[in-house]
Image (tube, helix red, strand yellow):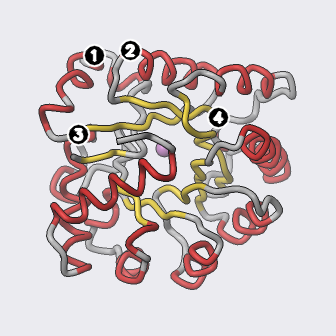
Amino acid sequence: MLFDTHAHYDDEQFDADRAELLASMPKSGVGLILDPGCDLESSRKAVALAERFPHVYAAVGWHPEDCAPFRPPDLDALRALAARPKVVAIGEIGLDYHWAENPPKAWQQDVFRRQLALAVELDLPVVVHDRDAHADCFAIVCEFPALRGVFHCYSGSVELARELWKRGWYVGFDGPLTYKNARKTVEVAAEAPLERILLETDSPYLPPAPLRGTRNDSRNLRYVAERLAEIRGMTAEELVELTAANGRRLFGIPA
Ligand code: NI
């Protein structure tokens, strides 16, 4: 059974067929899905999907690219949402220095820290988005030693990944692992402790190599599992089971 630990089914790209697609997932081998929110509205949508579909769980949070309108009282709304039984993490939160039009770095860091503090307060894991902000992301998560979670779609160096593994963090691998230019990610995937790996699609984004240019969905997680299996010299089936167990452990989802 595949566990897609990162898929945005609240995204408008799924407006036309969201319910049918989600309902069909278990018979396509996708037994669990985690939908992380990107702001209050998308977090509410993710929670509603989780409450409708038994195999869907939600994370709630403000994505760094969407955090400009964040105001401190929003944290109370997030806390209330996080109390719902199908919410298993705070996310997608983090830092994104890639786009010039993103909110200022200091603002992103402030919103990130407030949400990390909330995760510690609620004893929930976090789903971290780190794009071109590796050093700052690492330094900030280290300010909260009690935190646990995943660096989603890991794109940092193997040296940084080792520091994360030492501290109990998980790393997520997505479609880009299957791309031709994935040298650095392949290096990380080859060395990652097997109990620290999660598989994700980031649907509707980041489709695996054979499907680039199309809308991604959780069924395509197989391509990521197959590529990782090839790198690790294991069967895809072994990796699928192992990473699903990892996801259940991190997010506290019983078998
Ligand atoms: Ni995402």
Contact between marks 4 and 3 (CB within 8 A): the answer is no
Mark carried by residue 52: 2
Instruction: Give the image quarter of residue 141.
Output: bottom right
Residue 144 location (% of width, % of height): 79, 59
Q: Which residue is drawn at 64% across and 53% down?
A: 96
Contact between marks 4 and 1 (CB within 8 A): the answer is no
Farthest residue to the front: give it: 255
Sequence-wise first label, 2 or 3? 3
Callout 3: CB less than 8 Å from ligand 1:
no
| CA distance for labels 2 and 3 | 16 Å
The amino acid type found where label 1 is placed reads Ala
Q: How crowded is mark 4: few (under 14 residues within 10 Å), some or many (20 or more)?
A: many
Residue 224 location (% of width, % of height): 25, 60
Q: What element carries label 4?
A: loop
| For discs 1 and 2, the disc positioned in front in the rendered view | 2
Where the C terminus falls, by quadrant?
top left
The amino acid type found where label 3 is placed reads Val
Callout 4: CB less than 8 Å from ligand 1:
no
Q: Judge left or right: residue 20 versus residue 38.
A: left
Mark carried by residue 19: 1
Residue 80 location (% of width, % of height): 71, 20
Q: What element carries label 3?
A: strand
Residue denoted by label 3? 30
Sequence-wise first label, 1 or 2? 1
Instruction: Give the image quarter of residue 242.
Output: bottom left
The amino acid type found where label 2 is placed reads Arg
| For discs 4 and 3, the disc positioned in front in the rendered view | 3
Residue denoted by label 4? 61
Q: Residue at x 19, y 54 (%)?
A: 222
| CA distance for labels 4 and 3 | 24 Å
Q: Is mark 1 on a helix, strand or loop?
A: helix
Contact between marks 1 and 2 (CB within 8 A): the answer is yes
